[in-house]
Image: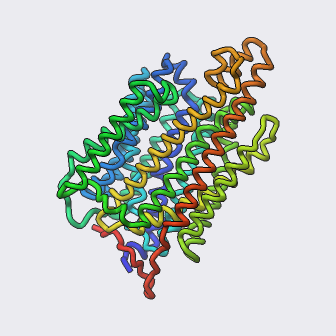
Amino acid sequence: MDAVTSSPRRWWALIAIVLSVLTVGFDTTILNVALPTLATELDAGNDDLQWIVNAYVLVFAGLLLPMGALGDRYGRKRLLMAGLGLFAASSLIAVFANSAGQVIAARALMGIGGAILTPLTMAVLPVLFDERDRGKAISLLTMGMGLGLPLGPIIGGYLLEHFWWGSIFVINIPVALIALLAVGLLVPESRASVARRVDLLGAAVSTLGLISLVYGVIEAPTKGWTDPWVLASLAGGLALLVIFVLVERRGAEPMIDLRLFRKPRFAWGTAAGTLASFALFGVLFIIPQYLQEVRGSDALGVGLRLLPLIGGLFVGAPLGERIAHLTVTKLPVTAGLLIGAAGLALGARTEISSDYGLVATWLAVAGLGIGLAITPAMDAVLGSLPRDQAGSGTAITMTFRQVAGALGVALLGSLTSAVYRDQLDTAPEPAKRSVAAAVTMAARTGDGALALAARTAFVDAMATALLVCAATAVLGAVLVALFLPNAKRRTGTGESVDELTRVA
């Protein structure tokens, strides 16, 4: 057994890695809470606010694939530390920004840091843990990622209530620096055993293709799916990604090895994580609106009321790892997706008069199912990767999950908007834009009937979206049950038969 994978020190190293993903995790949700404040303090219009969010998302999605490959080439620890340093530095720039443009630039830099951290935090796990403990490590990393979801609104609400708007970026700096120090001291360096030439053409084409595709997906709910710019962006992105696949298939030293998709555990583990991410991101897009506009919660209240979802995730992630260890991989993945679907279907029964107990119940069930599925699915992906491709292989999976998340928000956002507008066909046009606009108009005019109609329409729209999420999870469960192979067994000495990443 490798000296690193048997050392107790590896669990301390995992804490450093969890801190890294936590830094990225709560930054996104903390910003969403602060957008109204940024609009006032920086005199930012809707387009500015949209770009403050999207600058991060676009750069992040576009650079995931090349950053995973660069980690394999130059060293995963080295690049991980660079990502944390960049995240801290760009947060410092945002703290002292005095215009929306400067915040947008800082967010783009944060996107580069996030694109480095997301695949490489997962890619270093095979360096530290053999097959016996890798599932436990993934479950802890999954919980770390999930913890950022409610922490963002909770921390953001507190900071905005007691300090100035820049404090939402200050919080990133000490967390990133502590993680940077911990990674430097505790995480061993690792890289591919044979240094490949950097595939500049593949990196450029994949980055432009993903940025174009994600931009089209982001803009579609606002401009419409038939808008010429949206169609051009989607078509251009897909065309570039097709070119990227052709380049990678024919290249002597491709950035990513497309033959990985011939490995059923990699392909179907990625598929399970992708479909689960579609459902999860869709829920996280819809539920805060429901809690704020229908139930009247403030930002802090939204964060607190999301805790059942995270509680379910915290129970499901280690339980999924344990079940996979005792039985077979496809059992917890299939069961988790079905349980998640049941929770989402229960959520579709939410009515405007429903108390929070029902909401908390279905959020917990959905979180339990997603946690149960994702940990063994990601373990299947990592266990199938060759030693030299931990970074690029993980980046493929993370890219699919992030694009699925963006699609989940866009498609479900469009669906929710369509159902909502249909339910309010006789309401004034401004009230049809969103439930928030309708509630604001009703408060200004004293029209209680409009507020009730808007909230009822949004709950109906939410039910439709949750049913789509549930159907997606059921589809994932069927595919996993049919096609995901079970894990290879360990040898009698306890060594994993999966190849471990080489420690430099």
Whole-percent x and y of residue 57? 43, 37
Whole-percent x and y of residue 39? 53, 21
Viewer-proximal residue among 123 and 17: 123
Relative height, residue 242 to residue 78 (above, below): above
Q: Which residue is depicted at the point 72% across and 29% down? A: 457
Viewer-proximal residue among 69 and 210: 210
Relative height, residue 239 to residue 373 (above, below): above
Q: Could you tell me if residue 396 is visible in this image?
A: yes
Q: Quadrant of the C terminus?
A: bottom left
Q: Quadrant of the N terminus?
A: bottom left
Residue 353, picture quadrant: top right
Q: Which residue is the extreme one toward the bottom? A: 492
Residue 419, picture quadrant: top right
Q: Which residue is depicted at the point 45% across and 22% down? A: 48
Q: Which residue is depicted at the point 49% across and 52% down? A: 274
What is the image's colouring? Answer: rainbow
Whole-percent x and y of residue 167? 52, 32
Q: Could you tell me if residue 109 is visible in this image?
A: no
Viewer-proximal residue among 306 and 261: 261
Relative height, residue 98 to residue 359 (above, below): above
**Number of numbered discs visible in the structure rendering:** 0
Q: Which residue is the extreme one toward the top? A: 445
Q: Which residue is depicted at the point 35% across and 52% down? A: 80
Tell me: 381 left or right of 155. Answer: left
Whole-percent x and y of residue 278? 53, 47
Tell me: 268 left or right of 153. Answer: left
Residue 255, picture quadrant: bottom left
